[in-house]
Image (cartoon, helix red, strand yellow):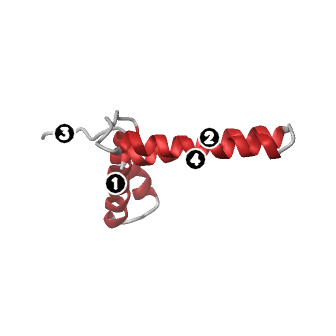
Amino acid sequence: MQVQILPFGFIQIFIYLRFCRLGFEAAIFILRGMSDMNEQIENIFSYHSPKPGQPDTYEAIREKAKEMAYLIDKLVPNSREKSLAVTNLEQAVFWANAGVARN
């Protein structure tokens, strides 16, 4: 009898599903979800070299965010809220650029 070794986690999922009396279809659904997550993880944690035109897109996003940062600095009194606004603007630039790079 040959024993097939499953990747870590699959055995635990099947045991859990068996314990909960869920069917094979539920197991397949969960495993497909894990496969989708694996693809997302690979995409998220991989280097994405710039494609033609992307550096210009990154620069445009940064320039508009810089305009907004100067506006916030000019109009908003120094405060925790101002700091958070600038920090979240910085984060928005990061995620926008990541969206361009990853997709």
Q: Earlier in the sequence, mark 1 or mark 4?
A: 1
Q: Is residue 12 visible?
A: no
Say whether marks 4 and 2 touch (CB < 8 Å).
yes
Could you tell me which secondary element the residue under label 4 belongs to? helix
Looking at the picture, which amino acid does disc 4 mark?
Lys
Could you tell me which secondary element the residue under label 3 belongs to? loop
Q: Is residue 92 left or right of residue 41?
A: right
1 or 4: mark nearer the eye? 4
Residue position marked by numbered label 4 in the rendering:
64
Looking at the picture, which amino acid does disc 1 mark?
Leu
**Alpha carbon of mark 3 to alpha carbon of mark 4: how far?**
58 Å
Could you tell me which secondary element the residue under label 1 belongs to? helix
Residue position marked by numbered label 3 in the rendering:
3
Q: Earlier in the sequence, mark 3 or mark 1?
A: 3
**Alpha carbon of mark 3 to alpha carbon of mark 2: how far?**
59 Å
**Alpha carbon of mark 1 to alpha carbon of mark 2: how far?**
43 Å
Q: Earlier in the sequence, mark 1 or mark 2?
A: 1
3 or 4: mark nearer the eye? 4
Residue occupying image coordinates x 83% and y 38%: 80
Residue position marked by numbered label 2 in the rendering:
66
**Alpha carbon of mark 3 to alpha carbon of mark 1: how far?**
20 Å
Residue occupying image coordinates x 29% and y 43%: 52
Looking at the picture, which amino acid does disc 2 mark?
Lys
3 or 2: mark nearer the eye? 2
**Alpha carbon of mark 4 to alpha carbon of mark 2: how far?**
5 Å
